[in-house]
Structures are given as structure tokens and as C-alpha cells.
Amino acid sequence: MANEPENLVLEYLRRFDGQMKGFDAKLDRLSADVRDLSVRMPSVEENLAGVHRRLDRLDVRFDRIERRLELIDTPHGGVSE
């Protein structure tokens, strides 16, 4: 009987050790994913800034087109539809 509790404790310790190894592997993958995101994020931000610049230029061009076609209010107060 003295041997049973010792084996039972060892069995639980082995299970715990196996679970911890699995946890460590998952944590390593998660850490790698976070590192990858931290490397890629500046590129995403830069690309997004480029999209915003392009949209701003398009907005200016559309305003110019609308003014030339007299589709919007002009500074002279004239309105055409």
C-alpha cells in the first residue's frame, strides 16, 4: 500500500509534465505569432497611409471635376444641378 500512493503521485506528476510540455509548445507558437505581427504591422500601417494619401488626391480631383462641371456651389454663389 505504501507503494500505491507513490506511484499515483508519480503518475500525476508525469501527466502534469506532459501537459506543461504541450502548454510550452503552444506558448512558443503564440510568441512566434506575436513577433510576426509586430514585424508586419509597420508595413500594414505604411500601406494604409498610402491608401489615405491616394483617397485624399482623388477627393481633390473629384472636387475639381465637380467645380468644372458646375455640379457644386461655386465661390461666386452660383448653384447648378
Image: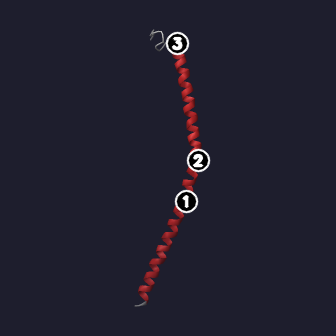
Say which element carries label 1: helix
Q: Earlier in the sequence, mark 2 or mark 1?
A: 1
Measure the C-alpha gap from mark 3 to mark 2.
44 Å
Q: Amino acid at mark 3?
A: Leu
| Residue receiving disc 3 | 69
| Residue receiving disc 1 | 29
Q: Earlier in the sequence, mark 3 or mark 1?
A: 1
| Crowd around label 3: few <14 · some 14–19 · many ≥20 (10 Å) | few
Work out whether 66 lies above or below 53. Answer: above
Say which element carries label 3: loop
Quadrant where the C terminus lies?
top left
The reply to whether dot 3 and dot 1 touch (C-beta < 8 Å) is: no
Q: Amino acid at mark 2?
A: Arg
Say which element carries label 2: helix
Query: Residue 59 appears at what percent x and percent y?
Result: 53, 24
Measure the C-alpha gap from mark 3 to mark 1.
58 Å
| Crowd around label 1: few <14 · some 14–19 · many ≥20 (10 Å) | few
| Crowd around label 2: few <14 · some 14–19 · many ≥20 (10 Å) | few
Query: Residue 57 appears at what percent x and percent y?
Result: 57, 26
Query: Which of 7/34 is in front?
Result: 34
Q: Earlier in the sequence, mark 3 or mark 2?
A: 2
Which residue occupies 50% across, 73% down? 17
Work out whether 50 lies above or below 78. Answer: below
Which residue occupies 54% across, 32% down? 52
Work out whether 78 lies above or below 5. Answer: above
Q: Residue lying farthest left?
A: 1
Query: Which of 27/15 is in front?
Result: 27
| Residue receiving disc 2 | 40
The reply to whether dot 3 and dot 2 touch (C-beta < 8 Å) is: no
Q: Amino acid at mark 1?
A: Arg
Which residue occupies 54% across, 17% down? 65
